[in-house]
Amino acid sequence: MPPLALIRGTLDLLVLRALTRGPMHGFEITTWLEDRSGGRLGVDDRALYQALQRMEERALIGAEWGVTENNRRARYYRISAAGRAHLEAETSHWVEYAATVTQILTVAT
Amino acid sequence: VSDDRRHVRSGVRRLFRLAVRRGDLRRDDVDEEVRLHVELRVEQLVRRGLTEAAARAQATEWFAGTGGTLDDAARDLRASATRRETRMALRERLADLRRDLRLAFRSLRRAPAFGAVAVLTLALGIGASTAVFGVVYDVLLKPLPFRDPDRLVGVYHHGADGNSVRQGPATYFTYRDHSRVFEDVGAWNTGRASLTGRGEPERVEALFVTDGTLRLLGIRPALGRLFGAADDAPGAPRRVVLSYGQWQRRFGGAPDVVGQSLEVDGTPCEIIGVLPASFRFLRTDPAVLLPMQLDRANVWLVFYFQVVARLKPGVTLDAANADVARLIPRVVDWIPGLAEWRLTPDVRPLSEDVTGGVERVLWVLAGTVGVVLLIAGANVVNLVLVRAEGRARELAVRTALGASRGRVARTLLAESATLALAGGAAGLLLAGAALRLLRRTAPASLPRVEELGVGPAVALFALGTAAAAGLLLGLLPVARLGAPNAMLREGGRGASDAPARRRVYDALVVAQIAMALVLLIVSGLMVRTFVALRQVRPGFTRPEEVQTFRVSVPGALVADARQTARVHAQIAERVRGVPGVVSVGLSSSITLDGDANGNPTFVEHAPVPAGTLPPLVRFKYLGAGYVETMGNRVVAGRPLAWDDVLQPRDVVLVSETMARKYWGTVPNALGKRLTNCSACSWRTVVGVVGDERDDGLSRPAPEIVYWPMLIEQFGDGPISVKRTMAYAVRSTRVGTPGFLRELQRAVWSVRPDLPLADVRTVAELQDRDMARTSFAMVMLAIAAAVALLLGVVGVYGVLAYVAARRTREVGIRMALGARRADVRGLFVRHGLRLALTGVAIGLVASLALTRVMATLLFGVRAVDPLTYVATSAGLVAVALLATWVPARRASRVEPTLAFRSE
């Protein structure tokens, strides 16, 4: 089964969600999302970095250079207070939205 | 949604100097990030069992997409990162700007008087200079509204005596047929035409053109077509093109007007087209256009029309002049008599025909207003410097607390920018109002006046001036920021009256006084010119009591020459019968109405050397009463009566200048004889009349011969008559309602379909002639008044400031026994020294600068002692007055108070 394509706008939320667990570099975020979705979500690598830049500009996340467990320089992203607020608001919105759409699509008329 | 958060965030970022990094840094980040990501992915895939090569291929594909390379992907990311960085930096800068402006506003609100005076001064300076720039730009600099206006030229000649010579058919045809430099050549001339047969009879301005004229200008008709070669051929059926306005007025904008017929001067003409509403040709405003229909078989020696031409691409004016010089001998071959005129070419840009003569006024004005701007600038600089000094302590404290010099400089700049922009905006409003006012009141002699207004160029000028002022005003105090610690140590006291600083103020005041004096002298000279022009004997008296209008009796209406003259005599008699009319006179041209002509004249016993042409003299043609009605003098002999005209007798009048030139004295001229062609009979001079300043009050009076309007054997048949005559009517009722209508009824009681044209008083003609002078005078007077006001404010401001700063010194002096008068004297002497230095410099500058305006002057030399002395004395007096007030205040200081104030 090919991975599911991401619905527009959800990538930001997923990344923010990942970062609530603590600072991560780009590849960690990817693998975390792949693991959590059981490999079903196809995260485009380039789109991920675009999203990181975008959210950095909007100050939802911050970034600084750090060192990985294997002593390699990596850019670590950290969710900001604004990012948490954003995630919270958007998550409830998403849940409500998804439930509504699901209900319309699945309940027999 | 996240605007606020972003703002907070950027503030934090700024606080810790974190992520505000340069784009190139971020770009390196991207490369490293991509590399790491791919490495980690490869390791992951290898762990899952792929070979190294397969894993690398897979990782690359996932990152860069199928067929993409890592470099491409990284480049994309780098580019978007750079874009973001730029955006963020810009946002930061805007936020900074907002903060600076807020600070500036706050600090200006704390000093409202300073702010108001500075903005007002700037507004005056910028407003005045913007308004004048607007006039200069619209009149002189803006391109003409034609296709490729740079290639349009007016083609003229210089004559032997240096006068400008227009064109005749011989030159026109020669240039049109044989020129190598002109793409197209067209002739034009203005005249008048009577429109009859449809609606009210009307006498309107007509523009006569050849077929090339409109074509080379690039005019496209709004309706129908314009003239072609067939319409312009001699003997072709008469056709007419209407102006847009005439089409609207007379035909109500009817779309089927093309093909209809309109009677022009009694001849039916087919309407072939309508001009676009935007059509403006130089300084004309025609209602109808008619073809000139020049005939090369009938080329006579008259130079009366003008020629406009389009240069071939890349042809210079010099080349064009050289080509015309090449062609002049061909013209002379055609008409040998021309050799005597020794024509030289004068091809010049067409734009000069539009601006004709006002450039000098405008440039003088522009210079003047530049000076006003400088004076205003000096004032504001003084204000800002004084204020900066007062704030030196505040700024020093801020610097000591860690604000960088750049930071403080930015605040100062923001403050001056705020002042300058406010001043610029107010100035632009002022300029807009001034231009609107000007458009309504400017003299008719100011060309393109209807185009005046605030356009992009004018707005840009105001903005540029304001920006320059803001920068200058901001940088000055920044430059004087000096070492902050020294400032603090001195406690902001000792340095405040440092001689170096005072010298700057003094220098600015001296400059202001010098500049104000230049303007006062310039406007004083203009006033003297105006007065001198008013005292010229123009050939008429009490011009406001003389109404003039033209009546034309077309040949289609009255064919016979004698009968035509009798119709005019009848009209004159009826007009004389209108209540309140004192006298009526007829002439082919009224003084100053611009109808200039030159005709060969032969004087008895003054033979014309063989092979040369006789002198050219202006001719006017009279009915009875013209000289008396205008209020001109009969210096010797008698004026013409209707008997002389209707008989007609072989008699003429000459002007005083003419009489002196040919017969030595005025009485000597009586009984002498002259004529207009070698084969014509002699006419006897029966009277000499006072000179008419026909070419303008400031120009010498021309020589004039006055003929009866009906003349036998004039060289064009047994008898000839002037059909169009100007009527001069003297009455104290001129200008009262109903008077004109009664005059019109009197005319129509003789012939109902004769229109009255060029209805105006002689006073209007005089005003028009003086318009340039009075315009320059009024504008210069306003500029000088503003300069004087600003200068006085400057003197007062500096002295008041110095007085305040020296309170302590004055206190000590008085404690030591100085009297109040001594203290006053101290300050008055200071003011006087400044004023006198300024006046001295101003006088020297004026001596050099007023030469530029010599051609604008009349009856007064550019170095006029009276003007120089009077304005200097006046300026010194006013400056002393401005010193007196602060001096008095300083002398009232109580010594004890003075010490306490420190």
Image (tube, coloured by chain):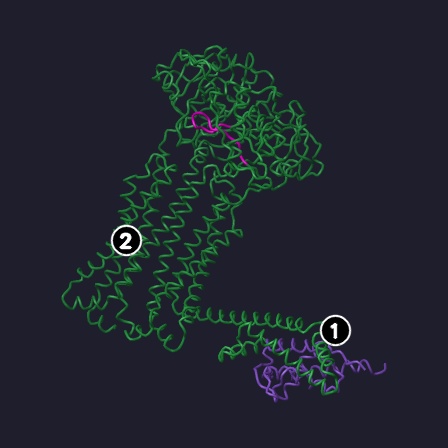
What mark, if any, has residue B120 been given in the picture? none
Give the colour in which the image draws chain A: purple
Q: CA distance from mark 2 to mark 1?
A: 85 Å
Quadrant in which the C terminus of chain B is drawn = bottom left
Quadrant in which the N terminus of chain B is drawn = bottom right
Residue under the point 38% across and 55% down: B376
- Provide the residue span drawn in magenta: B153-166
Q: Is residue B382 above or below residue B731?
A: below
Nearer-the-camera pick, B62 or B656: B62
Residue tagged 1: B66
Q: Which chain is green?
A: B
Q: Residues within 10 Å of mark 1 (few under 14, many from 20)?
A: few
Q: Within the image, what quadrant is residue A44 found in?
A: bottom right
* Chain of the residue under the numbered disc 1 shown in the image: B
**Looking at numbered disc 1 in the image, what kind of residue is underneath it?**
Thr
Nearer-the-camera pick, A1 or B440: A1
Q: On the picture, is B739 further left or further right than B687?
A: right
Residue tagged 2: B879
Q: Is residue B5 above or below residue B168?
A: below
Nearer-the-camera pick, B806 or B336: B336
Spot occupied by residue B591 in the image (x, y as percentages of width and height):
45, 28
